[in-house]
Image: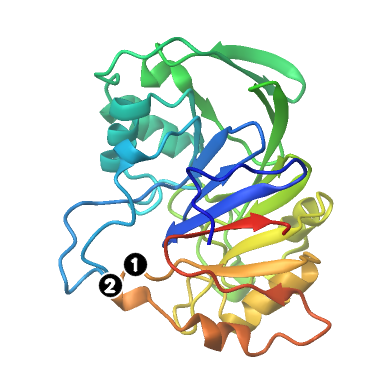
Amino acid sequence: MPNFLEVDVPEGAVALHWFEQSSFALKNSAGTTILVDPYFPQNRPAEQFVHPEPPIQEAEFPTDLVLLTHNHGDHTCIESLQRLEDAWQPKCYIGPIESVGKIVAEMVPGSKPMQDEAIKVDLNGVQIKKISKRMYPIDKTIVAVANETISCHRNGEEFTIYPVYSKPPEGDPNAQIAPPDVTHLGYVIDFSGVSVYISGDPINNFHRHDNLVDPILALEPDIGFLTTHPTEGEFPFFAGSLATAKRLKLKHAVPVHRACFVTRDYDPDLWAEPFGSSDPTPLVMERNSCIIYPN
């Protein structure tokens, strides 16, 4: 199993690290690292958490950009974000308006002085800012809006982040699903020519919503990290997760939002059982593990 921090990523591939729950890291051949929904709390009561120790210490994980899917505590965790800011001063925090608002209200500048390193960010083709480590967190935030393209230039490479809805803002009245409490996004990240889909926390019947599926399908993602649960109706059940993977025409699908909370854990092998030979290939990753994709 490759070590994410040490591995040299070949051109045309990405390193993908899944920690637990919905926390991920991506690294391209230039060494740029994106951290998604970092959630590594230190206080982990046995009755609440599956594992007594967090998968990493933030100070051990150099980070260039942070992506946030929505403003729930296990996706926008100020405790982890502040430790990342103190250790590495990531050059950009990208998330929906509520997550950005939380950063602005609660985070403070990193205490460790860092060499200034800029990253250029475009929104729908228009340069909006150059962001550097020396800025305050409030000045390094970008509000992600569904279907607005974010292009980033870092380490001599350009990569693109496409925010997409994971839950429709209006909910689904026909299915008696209320509007979500906050904006819920997913992302398709085009990184070194590999297209990675991060689902966030999707609506239970996601695969039935053409307005959610079509923008992702048009981006032709290769691999998808899919939040699911066998019984909890906020997310797609296992059958709905398979239906989502098929509708998105993924090559590989990875089950996530597990191995963290006792009450929300599940057996990923049971999730993989319904996948057939003509379906996307199910890929079960171990907690806190890394792969090179494609390999």
Q: Is residue 204 above or below residue 295?
A: below
From the top left corner, tell me how far across and down residue 217 is, in percent. 81, 57
From the top left corner, tell me how far across and down residue 183 is, in percent. 51, 47
Mark 2 neighbour class, 10 Å CA radius: few under 14, some 14 to 19, many 20 or more: some
Left or right relative to 211: residue 3: left
Quadrant of the rendered structure where residue 163 is? top right
Q: For the point 70% across and 21% down, which residue is it?
A: 156
288 or 148, which is in the foreground? 288
Q: How many marks?
A: 2
Q: Is residue 247 above or below residue 43?
A: below
Quadrant of the rendered structure where residue 170 is? bottom right
Q: Quick one: SS at disc 2? A: loop
Q: For the point 81% across and 66% down, which residue is it?
A: 249
Which amino acid, mark 1?
Cys
Q: CA distance from mark 2 to mark 1?
A: 5 Å
Q: Quadrant of the C terminus?
A: bottom right
Q: Quick one: SS at disc 1? A: loop
Mark 1 neighbour class, 10 Å CA radius: few under 14, some 14 to 19, many 20 or more: many
Asked if the residue at tag 1 contacts the one at tag 2, i.e. Cβ–Cβ closer than 8 Å, the answer is yes
Using the rendered image of the protein, determine whether residue 169 is visible from the camera's viewpoint. no
Residue where numbered disc 1 is placed: 260
180 or 135, which is in the foreground? 135
Q: Is residue 236 above or below residue 294?
A: below
Left or right relative to 232: residue 175: right
Left or right relative to 277: residue 173: left
103 or 193, which is in the foreground? 193
Q: For the point 73% across and 16% down, which residue is it?
A: 126
Which amino acid, mark 2?
Val
From the top left corner, tell me how far across and down residue 6 is, in percent. 50, 43
Residue where numbered disc 2 is placed: 50
Q: Is residue 21 above or below residue 92?
A: below
